[in-house]
Amino acid sequence: MPGVDMAGFSYRGDGPLAMRAIPHPAVAVAVESGGRAFDVHAAGRRWSGSMAVGLLPGAVDVHVQSAECVQIRLSPLVVPAVLGVPSAELTGTVVALDDLWGRDAERIRERLHHARTWPERFALIHTTLSRRLRADRVIDPEVAFAWRRIVATRGRVRVGDLAARTGWSRQRLWSRFAAQIGPTPKGAAMLVRFDHAIHRLAGGHAPARVAADGGYADQSHLHRDVRAFTAAPPTASVDEPWLAVDDTAWPAHSGAA
């Protein structure tokens, strides 16, 4: 399904695992299949089990005892059709999947629990998403165009240029984009640019080269952005387990893993 990626995660460690979920330009939905899988701590609150996590302005703490779940990454463009609410309503927060899907959330958890293989689980999720898909819940074509341009340019695009391409005023684009996606176009561009940069840093690329290629004014500018999104310097952020699995769970060449 366009704008939808899935990956399976399983953890059976010797003890609890603590990590941080690094901001990413997608809405994440975790559907657990083996009881309480993990706790997410954000804004002084704690959420457990199946949940949807909106676009985040910063990292959130995740504590795992044991886990088995399917994680779905949704482009903000398909969030209204799949989850029934605009991406903007989820921005910066966590919502229990039961609050979005009602009894369907419990049904899919039970079916995932009894599925024997990951392909079976992915097929179950795909069927659930297809059944719930609301083709009438779409966002403005101008907003969709702006988001796609931001992603395609890895955040290196001027808001004024986006507005000119859509035929809207800068103010109208700013307002409609924020109302439907969540962040402003500038905020979305910063998130997309950061996401590309932090993955390059985690891959071992030199910070100076990452800064130059990513459109940052200089290396200090890159460091400030990383600290703003992760509350940690690049040297600490690049070792986050969440980033270490991305190339395996979400290969860049594939629409679904």
Image (spheres, grey):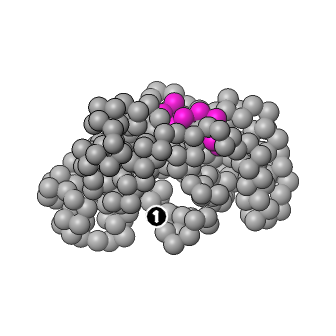
Q: Foreground: 215 or 164?
A: 164
Residue marked by disc 1: 244
Mark 1 residue crowding within 10 angstroms, few (<14) / some (14–19) / many (20+): some
Image location (x, y in percent) of residue 146: 39, 48
Q: What residue is shown at x 73% (from left), y 55% (from top)?
A: 126
Q: What residue is shown at x 33% (from left), y 60% (from top)?
A: 153
- Looking at the rendered structure, the secondary structure element under dot 1 is helix
The quarter of the picture where residue 115 lies is: bottom right
Q: Foreground: 28 or 36?
A: 28
Residue 40 appears in the picture as rendered: no
Location of residue 124 with respect to 172 vertically, above or below: below
Image location (x, y in percent) of residue 222: 22, 55
Is residue 141 inside the magenta stretch? Answer: no
Q: What residue is shown at x 38% (from left), y 60% (from top)?
A: 152
Location of residue 80 with respect to 113 vertically, above or below: above
Quarter of the figure that contains the N terminus: bottom right
Is residue 84 inside the magenta stretch? Answer: yes
The quarter of the picture where residue 255 lies is: bottom right
Image location (x, y in percent) of residue 229: 33, 45
Q: Mark 1 is on which residue type?
A: Ala
Q: Is residue 67 left or right of residue 196?
A: right
Q: Which residues are magenta?
A: 81-92
Location of residue 185 with respect to 151 vertically, above or below: above
